[in-house]
Image (cartoon, rainbow, N blue to C red):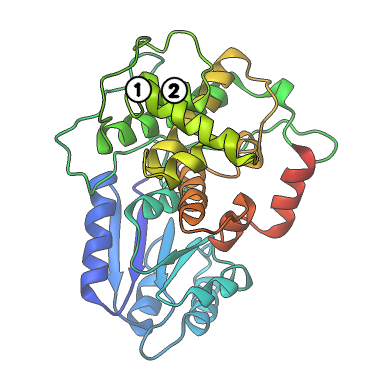
Amino acid sequence: MQPAILIVDDHQIYRSTLSAFIQSWWPDVFIAEAANGSQTLDLIGQHRWDLLILDYQLPTLSGGDLVRRLRARVSACGIPFPPFLLMSTQPDVTCFVRVLGAVGFLPKPVDVDELYALIAPYISEPEVPQSGSLPQPDRAVNQDVTHKMPVLAQPYAATSSAGMPDRSALRAADVERLQAMILELFNQKVARFPPPYAPGTNTGLSSPPYRVGEYLVQLGYLTPDQLTRALRAAELADNRIPLGFTLVKQNLVPSEVIATVLLQQFRDRLRRDARMAPRFIGEQLLLQSKLTPAQLGLAVQEQLDNYKRGRLVRLEDVIARKGWLDADTLRAAMLAK
């Protein structure tokens, strides 16, 4: 069935820009646009929408009031109410995300990577290439448009008595899909942020898992001398800040690259042992299929950028602020890790 998305925003430029990005990622998606609450109420019963993208601050009707009226209209039509995202220029709107039942929040101006990460789970799953056949990144692609990435179709079925996924029973297909998602995201970021230096001596990365610094040298994002100086600086500081935070703060490596390399490290360890224990809450959420790699990458990137500005924030706080998961889900993941 052709996926369908309804975009509601009173600014035509926002509607057309969002439509263009979504169409570039998923050409077969049907997209309809509405400029106000009245148009949205007319359109909501005409399709079984896979996703509704809703501006919270419409001129005649607030987002909350519109959602309530839409639920009533959909109920009368006898069709399920679609998952929806809220958009706003006001950050305090995030407090309404869970109250209204939204699946996520998009701050304006909208970040392209975040837009993709939020939409991907609600579009039909694309075919996942077989191992070793993933396409290499096209460096000629417009840098403002991200590549299509495969998404997990369903959360893992096997659970423990505490409600957490039983890693001993993870399906091989799920693990392979997760690895494919991470590799595609990794290829995309390397294409968008080409390494400035020649690759290190082990260009094939044939003996993972590597530490972050080693990975960055092998890929050409750091020279061996830069890595040595960064490690010495970390030792002199005598703190527990991970090396990646230091590298971003010193403007040596983009936060997008660090976040993706951390995901690639996780992929390397998954390939060695699919039952491996997660090292931090983000990996736990990936194993639970609660977050996509793209979402986790964005959250880690924001955490790194905050540290660069002198603020140390917890990853779970970033995830909660984006409206992706509620406090109970995050707390359960932390206890299970």
Q: Dot 2, crowdedness within 10 Å: few (<14), some or many (≥20)?
A: many
Q: Quadrant of residue 54?
A: bottom left
Residue picked out by circle 1: 219
Amino acid type indicated by mark 2: Tyr
Outermost right residue: 161
Outermost left residue: 140
Q: Is residue 128 something one can see in this rendering?
A: no
The correct choice, above or below, for 95 with respect to 82 in the image is below
The correct choice, above or below, for 231 with respect to 122 in the image is above
Q: CA distance from mark 1 to mark 2?
A: 6 Å
Q: Dot 1, crowdedness within 10 Å: few (<14), some or many (≥20)?
A: many
Q: Which residue is nearer to you in this view: 198 or 210? A: 198
Outermost bottom residue: 60
Residue 98 placement (x, y as % from top left): 61, 68
**Quarter of the picture holding the N terminus:** top left
- In the picture, the disc for residue 215 is 2
